[in-house]
Amino acid sequence: MLDVVERLLSALRPHLLGRFSDELGKLIPHRAAAMQTGDCPRSPLKVVGDQTIAQAVTSVEVQRLVDLSEPGKALVVDGVLGGVERRLVLFSSMPAVGKGAVLVVVPEDGELLTPELELAAQLWHILGTDAGQRALDPGPNVLAGNLAAATARAQAITDLGQTHAATLTTLLAVLRSGRLSDVVARRTAADLATDALLELKGVVDRDQALSEERAAAAFALLRTQLADLVRHTEVDVDLVDPVGDASLPQDIAHTARTMTRGLVLAALDRPATTRLRASWRLEGAVLRITVRDDSPEVTAAVPARGLTERLTALGGHWEVDAVPGWGTTVTAVLPLGVAEPPQLRPLDRLNPREVEVLTGISQGLRNRQIAEQLQLSEHTVKFHVRNILDKLDVSSRGEAAALAHDLRLEPVAHRTA
């Protein structure tokens, strides 16, 4: 047994699951094994064994099984793996260091003996402990690859999430529509679902090269993606063709569509929205993506975290103008290139709205007072304050106010709608 442990701990990380599966086969003969770990951002799901099973396994299936597992124990359960319900063995490890891992095994037909299951569970715990220790000190190449993979995965999740959300929102709009008969609604919903499945199947084949796309063509694709939603929602949605038709890098065009879809869905989700306008404007070296709605409720005006992370990763920023009772305008400012910006003073990093909020801070006003004078919601002011502190690299309102004295800022004045 010590020889087995030595062979497992000496395996290179990419070969770890294969080596464990080979040793496990001496205790529990099996057809395939799938591992999901929280310590490997590059490839958290790994599968070995029978390719008819391995190629069909999904992370969603494994995650559902994770919820059934118990750390330190071997559990025999009935579950779905590779699209088929099977008898499975679950091994879960939760060591003191690291995030642990779960192993799902498809055993051969036959009796599963308790001593072998318990010994296998102990081996998996040892392996999980070693994997957690390795994850604490990755080499530079591993770290760089993990960061790149994590970024790519976050972008893919945002893209697919927006696609799913748009499709589901459209399906709900169709099924709730009073303008369609039940038969027509069902047929329309079925057609939408079929198109969405075909589109998702093609996602993995999307070209990621930095080729160029004309702004008009990129927006036309967005219009097509949102066509069914626009057709069936009760909200009056106006998609305005881009002003300017420069070429966009493909990743920028794709990000712009993701941003627009996300902002449109957020606007549709706000109470009492009756009208919505989405537009792109090319201004020099930036693309401005603006979505305006007339919902009187503005407390949820701050864009979703996933969109914010995608935007800031490309050097972009938000401009939010939310007036209670009048509506919300959210603009994503997305740089078109990667040229180094000129050196700026800290206060020059703020957009006009943030300068107004900073002026109020420098006058000793509280968030509620600033919100009243600028006719914004207090929640929106908090959003701007957080951005101001980040951009100025300060930790308090007092430090921000001290920097503000370097500029001649106009006093915050009452605004009329």
Image (cartoon, helix red, strand yellow):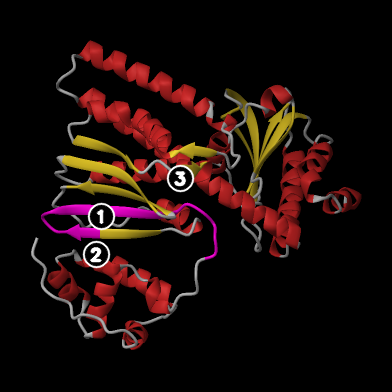
Secondary structure category for the residue under label 2: helix
Secondary structure category for the residue under label 3: helix
Q: Measure how far apart labels 2 and 1 are at the Cα level.
A: 8 Å
Residue at position x 68%, y 58% in the image? 144
Q: Is residue 180 above or below residue 206?
A: above
Image depth: mark 1 or mark 3 in front: 3
Q: How crowded is mark 3: few (under 14 residues within 10 Å), some or many (20 or more)?
A: many
Q: Give the magenta part as a residue range.
A: 321-340
Three-letter residue code for mark 1: Ala
Q: How crowded is mark 2: few (under 14 residues within 10 Å), some or many (20 or more)?
A: some
Q: Measure how far apart labels 1 and 3 are at the Cα level.
A: 22 Å
The answer to which of 9 and 280 lies nearer the viewer is 280
Residue at position x 86%, y 53% in the image? 10
Residue at position x 29%, y 42% in the image? 264
Label 1 or label 3, whichever comes before in sequence order = 3
Disc on res. 255? 3
Q: Residues within 10 Å of mark 1 (few under 14, many from 20)?
A: some
Residue 7, percent from left and from top: 88, 49
Label 2 or label 1, whichever comes before in sequence order = 1
Residue 91: which quarter of the image?
A: top right
Q: Is residue 44 magenta?
A: no
